[in-house]
Image (cartoon, helix red, strand yellow):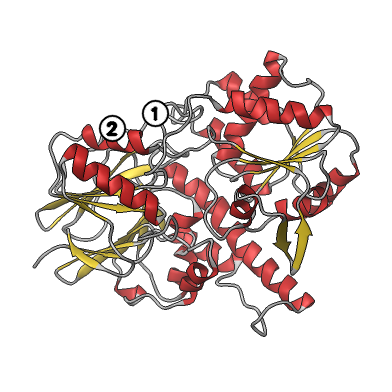
């Protein structure tokens, strides 16, 4: 019986990663992500999976971002009782991200019900904070490079992917087949994370393509971020920086600490990290030394450069601070969280700047701002956009097209097939084309819900 892969997410889109591998009546899922962005994608989160959750033997997590883990509480709530395998740092991050996701969903549903702008009565969260806490008990950790048996007779091995703390690619060996899942690959020159490890030999590769049609600029995040914050401070404005709480926020803190140390930003410019999740994540870098590029003094500088605002009252008090300031707050695509309240306050003033810090998925508020939208819809209202909008291109934690190809080239031998996933249609297709033309390997972009032999 052949080994098959069913693409239940991240096929034709950059979100909702879920790959179901099946062989001789057994199955496991590689990643278990939420769909984000366009409404028609988000609605998929409420559709039943084409497999019963209690028929899935295990879940392997490549890393902790919600588009790879955020469906896990719902899967467990609906009957998945197996083990969830992850690196230790991914487990630590999931313990921050998943309960926060449940809390935000509960808060958003409550807000919608109180203000009457939900089309559903009542608005209900996909899962609660309590659901997320329960599913964390199913996570088992395993070290990079150490083979393990997620289901009887199957072997898996994690190896470093860069990207964020704990991020891994996966080698899965089953039914005589070797399958590599790239997960999200980091950049060889990332300011925080170590470069991705070269992939082992495999019959089949599933590779992400977030930046499959683009190359990163030569400038680093210091060169891009510094001038934007300098301009804003000179105008007496406020910089609002929607930042992913895991990875991006820490890279920006590291950059701001460096800019202040160089004298390129005023030493007294107030910096606020207004995200409990990002605050908790920042604390993990000291616990996972050796898994990133920073030494102890750099970790200390990253942790001390900003005032950490943990409570709602502390967050609200930021607005009372007059004069120039910088607010880093989640979420990175302005899909929810405290950053929405800061955007609502500061979007309408030309002295302010909104700094977008990486890829903005289509359909998100961040994508609207990046595209030059004159209004932004939040909490049932269309707010005017008068602030300067800056989109950083050097802050991405994803490998670009050339770096993805270089990673594939480093394989010891050519695979029989490459599946190109986790990208917008143009990005995935351009990477597919380059793999076929430059590497001469068979490659295809699978459709959502399709099943292919591995």
- SS at mark 2 in the image: helix
Q: Residues within 10 Å of mark 1 (few under 14, many from 20)?
A: many
Q: CA distance from mark 1 to mark 2?
A: 10 Å
Q: Would residue 210 appear left or right of 152 to someone viewing this image?
A: right
Is residue 168 in view from this perspective? yes
Q: Which residue corresponds to the image point at 30% horizontal and 69% vertical from the top-left?
A: 56
Closer to the camera in the image, 250 or 408: 408
Task: Return the disc, 1 or 2, that comes first in the chain's sequence.
Answer: 1
Tag 1 residue? 188
Q: Position of residue 318 (x, y in %)?
A: 84, 43
- Nearer to us of marks 1 and 2 is 2
Task: Please say if 409 is above or below 6.
Answer: above
Tag 2 residue? 406
Q: Would residue 70 appear left or right of 99 to someone viewing this image?
A: left
Label 2 near label 1: C-beta < 8 Å? yes
Closer to the camera in the image, 7 or 102: 7
Task: Please say if 407 is above or below 452.
Answer: above
Kindly indicate the quadrant of the structure image that contains residue 161: top left
């Amino acid at each position: 019986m052949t080994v098959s892969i069913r693409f239940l997410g991240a096929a034709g889109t950059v979100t909702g990663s879920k790959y179901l591998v099946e062989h001789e009546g057994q199955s496991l899922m590689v990643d278990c992500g939420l769909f984000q962005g366009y409404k028609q994608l988000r609605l998929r989160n409420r559709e039943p999976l084409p497999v019963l959750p209690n028929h899935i033997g295990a879940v392997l997590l490549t890393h902790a971002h919600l588009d790879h883990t955020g469906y896990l509480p719902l899967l467990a709530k609906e009957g998945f009782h197996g083990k969830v395998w992850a690196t230790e740092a991914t487990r630590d991050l999931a313990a921050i991200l998943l309960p926060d996701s449940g809390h935000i969903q509960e808060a958003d549903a409550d807000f919608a019900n109180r203000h009457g702008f939900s089309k559903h009565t009542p608005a209900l969260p996909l899962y609660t904070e309590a659901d997320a806490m329960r599913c964390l008990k199913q996570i088992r950790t395993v070290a990079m490079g150490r083979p393990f048996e997620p289901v009887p007779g199957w072997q898996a091995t994690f190896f470093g992917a860069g990207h964020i703390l704990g991020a891994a690619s996966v080698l899965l060996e089953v039914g005589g087949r070797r399958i590599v899942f790239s997960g999200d690959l980091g950049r060889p020159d990332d300011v925080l994370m170590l470069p991705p490890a070269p992939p082992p030999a495999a019959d089949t590769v599933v590779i992400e393509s977030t930046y499959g049609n683009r190359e990163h600029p030569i400038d680093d995040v210091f060169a891009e971020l510094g001038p934007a914050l300098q301009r804003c401070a000179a105008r007496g404005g406020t910089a609002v920086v929607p930042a992913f709480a895991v990875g991006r926020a820490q890279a920006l803190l590291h950059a701001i600490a460096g800019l202040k140390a160089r004298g390129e930003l005023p030493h007294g410019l107030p910096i606020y990290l207004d995200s409990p999740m990002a605050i908790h994540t920042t604390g993990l870098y000291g616990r996972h030394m050796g898994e990133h590029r920073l030494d102890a003094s750099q970790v200390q500088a990253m942790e001390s450069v900003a005032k950490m605002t943990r409570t709602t009252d502390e967050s609200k008090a930021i607005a009372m601070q007059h004069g120039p300031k910088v607010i880093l707050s989640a979420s990175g695509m302005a899909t929810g969280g405290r950053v929405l309240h800061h955007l609502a306050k500061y979007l309408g003033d030309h002295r302010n700047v909104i700094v977008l810090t990486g890829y903005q998925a289509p359909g998100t508020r961040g994508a609207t701002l990046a595209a030059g939208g004159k209004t932004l819809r939040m909490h049932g209202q269309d707010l005017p956009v008068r602030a300067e909008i800056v989109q950083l291109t050097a802050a991405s934690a994803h490998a670009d097209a050339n770096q993805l190809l270089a990673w594939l080239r480093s394989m010891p031998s050519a695979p029989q097939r490459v599946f190109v996933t986790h990208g917008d249609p143009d990005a995935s297709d351009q990477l597919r084309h380059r793999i076929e033309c430059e590497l001469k390997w068979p490659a295809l972009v699978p459709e959502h819900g399709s099943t292919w032999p591995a």
